[in-house]
Amino acid sequence: MSTGRIHPSLGLPPITIYSNSPSELLPPFLTSTVVSSDSDEDVTVVEGPSKLSASDLDAMIEGVIADHPAGILLYSVLPGALLTQAKKAEKKAAKRKRASEETDTAAATETKPPAKRRSKTKAPTADSDEPPPSITYYIKIPKEAPAPTKKRTPKPTEDDTLQKGPFVLPMSASYLDLLSAIATELPCLVENINQSKIMWKTKKPLTGLGKAVGYAAMVEELKGKAERVVILFMPPPNKPMEEPMLWETEEAPPPTFDYSELERAGPSGSIAEQKISFNASTRTERAKLEEKYPIGNDPRWPNLRVYHQPETGYFFDLNATRLGVWAASMSQKLTDEKTAPASRFFDAQQRIKNIPPMPSALHNSSLETTVTPLAPAVPVPAIPAPAPVPAPAPTLSMTDIFLASLMSGGGLPALFPQLSPANHASTPAGVPAIPSSSLSQPRSAPPSPVKRHNVQLDQFCDLYGLAEGDASLLKDVGFRPGDKTTSTLDDELQKAGFTIFSWRRIHNANVRFKGDLASGVFDS
């Protein structure tokens, strides 16, 4: 009989086996050391070959291996069948362990209540610190349309609108609250807001606000949205029909909208800035022209710089525009200070059309005028008495004749030619007849088309209410008050920038000026 003991390093319970099998047939985890033990729990005694066969011993070993498979895997040399059974036993043990752990976990889960799923939005409570839902508003007001040009119309940009805001209102706010907030932002009076033309949008096309009813629909539509931002498109507020009376009180003046914010800025600054920049670049050439053509260089126009074109004999007023055009051509080496550039500002239409006589020539002619001596007196014979004048018709009284003469403006001879002394006076024989024209008025030179005056263009525009834009265009074309004008707008004036209505205003003002000039308004 052989004895063996499971090696203690395997972590297996000490079991001593007594077998008839030789020791070399025992598994390698059994030792040949005989161990005695007084405990029946640790020692298993097998007596006699008739009671324990080799298969029983194998079954005992397999049972030990099934209970402690980890110890068997430490050995690299094992019988094939024994190794296969050991792996199967290990899998079954792991499966039993997982099932046991799952059972324990399920039991622990059944004892706890299920966790509630967290909601994305918190329910409003009385003690909640979150603010009520609100709407953010922006206001956009379109600016004035740009002046029409021959170039392609530019695309609209953000600069085309005046933006106000933002301001925030709760969704529970009323339509009157919205109007009050708009009036505060602009600022203006609530009654001046053009409510019927307010449009709103989020990221969708524009929608009409529709006053109070449309406002309620907008709030209802925005309740289900996470982002509540509204853009209000509206025209500028209406200007008040009359200025309110401001009494001497401590109250603040009413809010007034600044309409100058709607003015569109030019691409490179204002017109005045462009003129300053242009004049700075041609300062040297302009100084040469001003030195050569000073003010009053021609005595016929004491307040103007006049250029005489020798080729055509035309005279031109060298105003600021013509000086700038001429100086620009000189800076480009296209001409000099003696020859005007080839420009529409120096064509025949822009010349000075009313040329007065030279003051020196008029003075000399008046000195050289001699008085013709009167012819010697001729003795006049006695003139017979004229024939009696026929009496007027008996149907007319003297009062009627007197009133009729006053209304006709020509006196009695104009009303009744037969009462004219020329029809009843007879010239004595031998006395030469004197023409009536020479007796009525002395001979004089033909009247000039426009009386000379010193009224400048700016004064003319101020007196007759012409706009600044019209005054600027008149300076560009060289207009002087009193020049001959027509009521129709020709192509040249239209190219210069005049419109039909602006030219009619200028023509009517010029006609009135000529009448005032002839009546002596500007004599003093």
Image: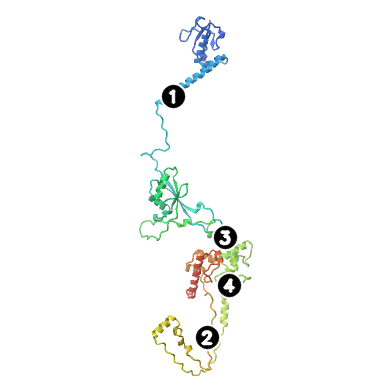
Earlier residue among tags 4 and 1: 1
Write down the residue under mark 1. Answer: 105
On residue 438, the disc is: 2
Q: Marks 4 and 1: CB-CB under 8 Å?
A: no
- Position of residue 512 measured from the top left corner of the image (x, y, whole percent): 48, 71
Mark 1 and mark 3: span between their CA atoms? 91 Å
Q: Nearer the viewer, mark 4 or mark 2?
A: 2
Mark 4 and mark 3: span between their CA atoms? 28 Å
Identify which amino acid the numbered label 2 is placed on: Ser
Write down the residue under mark 3. Answer: 278
Residue 400 occupies which quadrant of the picture? bottom left
**Can residue 125 be seen at all in this image of the molecule?**
yes
Write down the residue under mark 4. Answer: 298
Residue plotted at (47% across, 48% down): 205
Where is 66 relative to 296, above or below?
above
Query: 20 and 356: which one is in front?
Result: 20
Q: In terms of secondary structure, where does tag 2 sit?
A: helix
Q: Marks 1 and 2: CB-CB under 8 Å?
A: no
- Position of residue 35 measured from the top left corner of the image (x, y, whole percent): 50, 8
Q: Assess disc 2: are there few (<14), some (14-19) or many (≥20) residues with their C-alpha within 10 Å of its C-alpha.
A: few
Q: Assess disc 3: are there few (<14), some (14-19) or many (≥20) residues with their C-alpha within 10 Å of its C-alpha.
A: few
- Position of residue 338 measured from the top left corner of the image (x, y, whole percent): 63, 67
Q: Assess disc 4: are there few (<14), some (14-19) or many (≥20) residues with their C-alpha within 10 Å of its C-alpha.
A: some
Identify which amino acid the numbered label 4 is placed on: Asp
Q: Nearer the viewer, mark 4 or mark 1?
A: 1
Q: Assess disc 1: are there few (<14), some (14-19) or many (≥20) residues with their C-alpha within 10 Å of its C-alpha.
A: few
